[in-house]
Amino acid sequence: MKKHQETPQCATCGSRHLSVFCSLSQDEISEIDNNKGCNFYSKGQVIFHEGNRTKGIYCINKGKVKLYQIGSEGKEQIIRFAKAGDVIGYRAMLSEEPLSASAASLEDDTTICFIPQDQVLSMITKNPNFNFKLLKMLSHELGEAAKVITDLAQKPVRERLAETLLILKNTFDVDEHKVIQVKLSREELANIVGTATESVIRLLSEFKKDNIIAIEGRNIKLLNIPALTRIANVFE
Amino acid sequence: MKKHQETPQCATCGSRHLSVFCSLSQDEISEIDNNKGCNFYSKGQVIFHEGNRTKGIYCINKGKVKLYQIGSEGKEQIIRFAKAGDVIGYRAMLSEEPLSASAASLEDDTTICFIPQDQVLSMITKNPNFNFKLLKMLSHELGEAAKVITDLAQKPVRERLAETLLILKNTFDVDEHKVIQVKLSREELANIVGTATESVIRLLSEFKKDNIIAIEGRNIKLLNIPALTRIANVFE
DNA sequence: CGTACCATTGAGTTGCCTCAAACCTAGTGG
DNA sequence: CCACTAGGTTTGAGGCAACTCAATGGTACG
């Protein structure tokens, strides 16, 4: 039994003011509303496939998404996450290259709007603020990617896992019980850190033994963030 | 004894037509020429430091440059390279963040122009072609970074070294004797691959034993590119 | 022609991976 | 309502890729 799902309107989208679209005028917003599409995804559904072309960008209205590549041995590597207000697919659209990553929803009722290329390109041309927001977003992402590269190349798995937990906290926040607000399998955690599932499990249970985290199924509670930060070997 | 070094003019810069500046008008070119600065670097000199702010972008007129971060244990990680016609520092300028990497010249007589922020921002606003070139460049870089992340996370050192040699070939080309046109120390190679210097040395001499490469000091000759490609485990 | 830096080789150690088996949980259907 | 199954999690054992440390060899440059 499927509940009724209504296409969300940009005009009333709560995420808009936090996003790259925050500088759009009323007219521009309604222009998008008249041209966009919208889709609903259940947990695990693929939104787009690495290697395909995209003729627009995806804007997440509700839910959480992982972006990942499949490595040469068929193993998934999670590149980044996206949540309500974030856009995905813009990299491939702007570079006119195939999508460099696949995207899959992490939750049921994930709602994602599709804004056609023409709309986006016209906004870039007509709205300098939007253009600079885009440039800034891309530049920021590129800086983050460089950090990840250095970490992967130099840090041991233990440090990378600790850092990953902190990044998940910053991305998805924690609730009043300090539980990270995203549910990932052990395998998915391994596919962020770049290690084997078993290594993640062993290290998590070490952190647990030291009372740095608590674990209830896929919920991870961060008990001692300073200790995690120390293990992660980050200063900033 | 220093030879006379003259500030190069964008108007006559041979690299311009290959670069992000290829779509500029005569007026815009001379506008830049009137406002840019220029510096000369000997091998190993630092052009800018990670963590500093930049108020413009650097355009390489002559020479080769490495961009690198220093990891938490003080180890260098080379993020990417730049050569004549490439620009560096644009990421930090556009995101209004500190520089995420340092840059150092790899050759004597490296010549680099500095174009102030105002000039660049005005070009972005006034010249849509330039703007789209920038967006495209950033997007492309971001896609490349994602590939590097997956490789570092999943491929063994042997594969990564083979792939690095191929990337160096694509970036700097080979001469008529199949020698890669960039001279790097074993340590620098290790700092691209993300491994120890000794591992690079051992693997290079394995490749040499199998007649896949030849080595004369820091010159690396690619004798069997299909074999290297097979080792690198790349398909594209 | 020394000296300082880089490259090479060897030996020993270990972090992390793989393989395999057992366990747990949630969903399914009898 | 409970047995059954499938998928995910956990634990253990064993092996190897790659690291560190240390010593030697090469070479470029003042």
Image (tube, coloured by chain):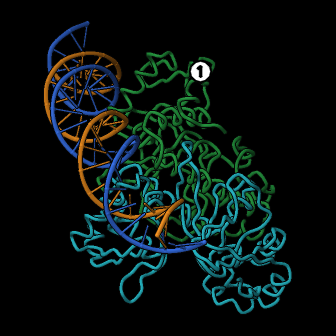
Chain colours: A green, B cyan, C orange, D blue
The answer to whether residue B41 is left or right of residue A103 is: right
Estimate the x, y position of residue D2 in percent, counting from the top left.
Answer: 20, 9
Q: Nearer the viewer, residue A214 or D27?
A: D27
Q: Judge by depth and name the residue closer to the eye, A33 or B219.
A: B219
Q: Residue at x 64, y 37 (%)?
A: A235
**On the image, numbered disc 1 is attached to which residue?**
A178
Q: Quadrant of the C terminus of chain B?
A: bottom left
Q: Disc 1 sits on a residue from what chain?
A: A
Which quadrant of the structure image shows residue D10? top left
How dense is the environment of label 1, judged by Cα within 10 Å: few (below 14), some, or many (20 and up)? some
Closer-to-camera residue (A97/D11): D11
Point out residue B128 in the picture as x, y percentages from the top left corner: 73, 76
Q: In the rendered view, tell whether residue B47 sits above or below residue B127.
A: above
Q: Give the number of marks.
A: 1
Task: Look at the picture and state if A155 lies above or below B122.
Answer: above
* Residue B129, quarter of the rendered image: bottom right
Amino acid, disc 1: Lys
Locate residue A118: give its quadrant: bottom right
Q: Is A10 on the left-hand or right-hand side of B108?
A: right
| Image position of A197 with respect to B20: above or below | above
Residue at the spot 56% in from the left edge and 46% down from the top edge: B74
Q: Is residue A109 left or right of residue A19?
A: left
